[in-house]
Amino acid sequence: MEPFGVKATILATSVATLLSWRAHRKKSLTVSGSAAAFAVGFLSIWTGVRGFNLLIFYQLGTTATKYKKDYKMKVDGSIAISGSQARGPTQVLACSLIAVILGLIHGVLCGKEGPIQFASTNATHL
């Protein structure tokens, strides 16, 4: 898929909307955190299919956060004190901003995804 193209824009808008809405509905993100997640998701997928790597990271992080939640609340009282597990834009961007920036740079400089030619001596494919 061509980065920044029409297909990438439609896919990025659809997936980012669905995921940010779902996270807000499940109360894992605040409204502003959901807006930041939309921006991160959109920009990640807009650079091409490689952007789905960040979404896999998001899903793994969400699953890990929920794993043994009761035990973590006993050990670390900060969740109980704050009363909320919803993440805001600061947490969303802290975990993903560098990946988004590097993905955008890679999309601009390298363009469409393709196989890596290790045997090739042509440096323009790197």
Image: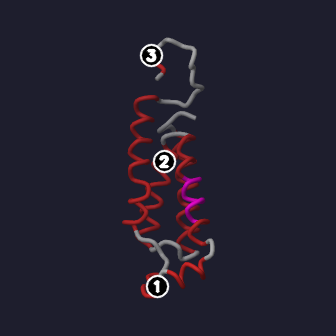
In contact (CB < 8 Å): disc 2 and disc 1? no
Residue 52 image position (x, y, % from top left): 57, 47
Q: Position of residue 81 (x, y in %)?
A: 43, 88
Which contiguous range is marked in magenta? 55-62
Of circles 2 and 3, the one toward us is: 3
**Image mark for residue 77:** 1
The residue lying at 45 percent from left, 74 percent from top is 30
Question: In the structure shown, which secondary structural element does the residue marked by tag 3 occupy?
Answer: helix
Res 14 visible: no
- In the rendered image, residue 114, in percent from the top left (x then y), is placed at 58, 27
Sequence order check: which comes first, mark 2 or mark 3?
A: 2
Instruction: Return the residue at label 2.
Output: 44
The quarter holding residue 22 reads bottom right
Question: What mark, if any, has residue 29 been given in the picture?
Answer: none
Q: Measured along the vertical axis of the image, is residue 85 above or below residue 109?
A: below
Amino acid type, callout 3? Ala
